[in-house]
Amino acid sequence: MREFFDNHKALKNDGRAILSAKREASKNAIKMPEKNTGKTRREFLKDLGIAVTALSVITSGGSMDITARKENNHIREVEDSITSDEIAELKRKLHTENIAEHKEDIDDYTFLNEIKHPRLVDTGILEGKNFADLYATYLGIPSGSSVPEKINVDFKANLARLWRQKFGFDINGKTQKEERTTREKFFHKHKDLMNLAESLYSSYSPEKSERVSLTEYAKEITKVSNNSHRVFMHTMYALRHDKDFPRSRRNIIEKLAGHIGFEKLLACSLTEIMPSPHGETNVSVLDFLLRNAGKEFINRIPSVHDMLASFGPYQLTPILFAPGGSGSLAEKIEKRLPHDFIPKSVNDVSGDAHHRVAYITAIEHIAHLAGKFSQNELVKVNYRLERTAPDILHKEILTFIAMSHHRPTEAYTYFKHVFMNKSGHGTHSVEKMIRKIHNRGLRQYAHKALANYDFLSTKGAVASV
C-alpha cells in the first residue's frame, strides 16, 4: 500500500503521471483512425477530445490545422448523431479543464479575485444554528454567526475562499503588499496546486451544477459501490490461483468488502469534509449543499489542512495514486481491474469516480490488513468474523476504513490486534474498542466517523433531513 509514500514525492509522482498522460495524448492525436466504423459515441468524443487538446485548438480561440479539420469533418459525417452544439460544448469543457496550464502570472488566476454573483436561498432546517469555520465558509456567513432564514450566497465565491484558505491566503492583518508577496511566493513554489485550484474553480458553475437530495446522492453512491463490488469480485476470482490469495485470505477480504455500503462511504466522506462530531448536523449541511450548490461543489471542496492536491467528498490525495510496493496485494488487485476503471491521477478524478476510487481504496486497505495475517491467523480471524454480531462487525469495518484513510499504518496494526481477539457482544463494545486507540487525534477521528455512521444507519435518517 501507499502509507509509506512521502508527501512531497507523492506530489512529484502525480505531476509525472500528468505529464506522461499528456505525452501519450500527443502521440495518440496524430494516430487518429481515418474511419470511424464501429466507434461508439464515447470513443468518438474521446478521440476528438485528444485531437483538440493536442492541437491546442481551444486554448486561445485558435483554429484547427487544415488536415485535422478535414479529418474531424470526415468523422463528424460518419457520426451523424454528434451535433455541432455538442462539439462546441466539448471544446468549452476541454478549454475549462486546460485553462490553468497557461497561467504565467499570479494575476491570471481568477479564483484569487472572484466576482460575486449571490442568489437568495432558504436555509431550511439549518436556520438558527450557530456555525463557524468550514460550515461558515460553505454557507458564506460570518464565522460564529447564527444561520438566518435566508442567505444571499455565491457558492462559487465560497469555493474560491476555501482554496485560498488552503493556501494560507487572505490572512487578517496583512497589507495588500504583504498579501501579494505571500501569493507570489506560493505561486512559484506550488504552481501545480494553483493550477488545480484554478481548474476546479473555473469549471464550476452553480447554475449548471446537478442539484440533488441526500436520498438521491445515497442512491448514486449505492449504484457506484454495487458496480465496483461486482468488478472487485471478478478480480478476486481472477486471483484465485495466486499464492498470495489463498481461499482463507480471500474469504476475509471478500467478507469485509461485502459490508461496504453507502452508509460507510458517506460516513467517511462526512468525516473528511464536515467539522462537527454530530452526525445529524453533518448530514443536514451536506443535504443543504447538495440541494443548493450541487454535487459539483462537493466534488471540488479542497482539504484545507494540507499542501497536497487533495479535494472532493473523500479528500483524495496523490498518495493514493502513488506506486505501491512491488508485488503487494493491493498492486495485484489493481493490475486485475479493468483498464481505466481507476483514474491515473488525483487530478483526473471527477463525478462518480470519487465514489469508485473511495471504494477501491477501502478494498486495498482491507487487502493490506489481510496480508498481515499468517495462514494460522487467517483461520482464527475467519472464525472470529463469522461469530461477530452483524451490527458490531459493521461498526468495526467502518472504523477501520475511516482510520485507514487517515493514518493507515496505525489502523493496520490496531485492527490486526482487534480481529485476532474475541469480539465484543454489547452495544458499547465498539466504543470501548475506540477508547483504547493510543493516538488522541486518531481516536477523535474514529469517534467522529462512528457518529456519522450511527446517524446514517438509523432507519429513515437519510430521508428525514
Image (spheres, helix red, strand yellow):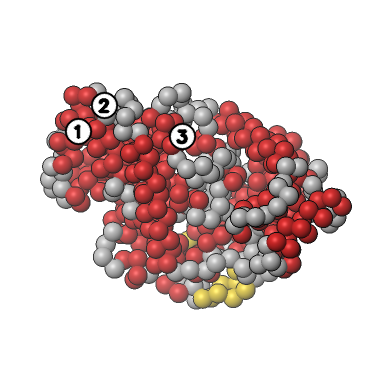
Where's residue 227, x and y in %?
40, 53
Q: Nearer the viewer, residue 350 or 87?
A: 87
Check disc 2 and give the amino acid type: Phe
Is residue 170 left or right of 239 when viewed as pictured? Answer: right
Q: Which residue is mark 2?
A: 373
Q: Secondary structure at mark 2?
A: loop
Residue at figure coordinates x 35%, y 33% from the top left? 239
Q: Residues within 10 Å of mark 3 (few under 14, many from 20)?
A: few
Q: Residues within 10 Å of mark 2 (few under 14, many from 20)?
A: some
Q: Residues within 10 Å of mark 1 (few under 14, many from 20)?
A: many
The residue shown at (62%, 55%) is 39
Quarter of the image with the C terminus in it: bottom left
Name the residue carrying label 1: 381
- Numbered tag placed on residue 64 in the rendering: none
The disc label shown at residue 335, or none: 3
Q: Nearer the viewer, residue 105 or 324?
A: 324
Which callout, 1 or 2, points at the residue further toward the start of the chain?
2
Q: Is residue 14 left or right of residue 91?
A: left
Q: Residue at x 68, y 37 (%)?
A: 24
Q: Position of residue 22 (x, y in %)?
A: 69, 39
* Residue displayed at 60% across by 72% down: 152
Amino acid at the residue labelled 3: Lys
Q: Determine if residue 452 is in view.
A: no
N-terminal label among 1 and 3: 3
Q: Where residue 354 sits: x, y (%)?
A: 49, 50
Tag 1, which secondary structure? Answer: helix
Q: Amino acid at mark 1?
A: Val
- Nearer-N-terminus badge (2/3): 3
Cα distance, mark 2 to mark 3? Answer: 22 Å
Q: Separation of disc 1 and disc 3 at Cα?
A: 27 Å
Q: Are marks 2 and 3 in contact (CB under 8 Å)?
A: no
